[in-house]
């Protein structure tokens, strides 16, 4: 693998990690409410908070082909 592809892979995985951490931060307040026995938010809000996690997991899953596609002209 070329150094350009490795750098692109690193950046893509860094962005994916940021999406996952952002989603976990969104869910931390609901977890705190759940532990303190307060009712959580409605299901629609919980589903919207899961979107960044799904994007991050999809980026992790497809990071290698995306990096190869971005750097195919640099080899």
Image (cartoon, rainbow, N blue to C red):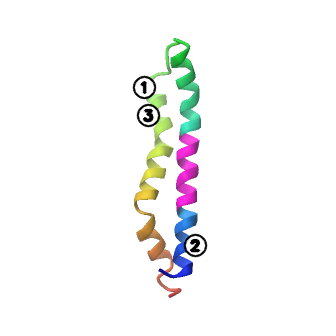
Q: Which of disc 2 and disc 3 is earlier in sequence? A: 2
Residue at (45, 69) in percent of width and height: 66
Q: Which of disc 1 and disc 2 is earlier in sequence? A: 2
Closer to viewer: mark 3 or mark 2: 2
Helix, strand or loop at mark 2: helix
Closer to viewer: mark 2 or mark 1: 2
Helix, strand or loop at mark 3: helix
Question: Residue 26 location, x and y as percent?
Answer: 57, 34
Asked if the residue at tag 2 contacts the one at tag 3, i.e. Cβ–Cβ closer than 8 Å, the answer is: no
Asked if the residue at tag 3 contacts the one at tag 1, i.e. Cβ–Cβ closer than 8 Å, the answer is: yes
Report which residue position mark 2 lands on.
7
Inter-mark Cα distance, 1 to 3: 6 Å
Magenta: main secondary structure equals helix
Report which residue position mark 3 lands on.
47
Question: Residue 49 location, x and y as percent?
Answer: 50, 36
Helix, strand or loop at mark 1: helix
10 Å crowding of disc 3: few (<14), some (14-19), many (20+): few
Q: Is residue 17 within the magenta segment?
A: yes
Report which residue position mark 1 lands on.
43
Q: What stretch is highlighted in magenta?
A: 13-23
Asked if the residue at tag 1 contacts the one at tag 2, i.e. Cβ–Cβ closer than 8 Å, the answer is: no
Q: Which of 52 and 4 is in front in this view?
A: 4
Q: Is residue 21 above or below residue 59?
A: above
Question: Residue 32 location, x and y as percent?
Answer: 57, 22
Q: Is residue 7 above or below residue 33?
A: below
Residue at (50, 88) in percent of width and height: 75
Q: In this view, does 33 lie above or below 12?
A: above
10 Å crowding of disc 1: few (<14), some (14-19), many (20+): few
10 Å crowding of disc 2: few (<14), some (14-19), many (20+): few
Question: Residue 42 location, x and y as percent?
Answer: 46, 22
């Amino acid at each position: 693998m070329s150094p350009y592809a490795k750098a692109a892979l690193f950046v893509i995985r860094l962005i994916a990690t940021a999406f996952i951490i952002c989603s976990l931060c969104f869910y931390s307040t609901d977890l705190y409410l759940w532990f303190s026995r307060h009712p959580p938010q409605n299901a629609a809000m919980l589903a919207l908070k899961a979107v960044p996690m799904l994007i991050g997991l999809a980026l992790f899953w497809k990071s290698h082909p995306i990096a190869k596609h971005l750097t195919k002209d640099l080899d």
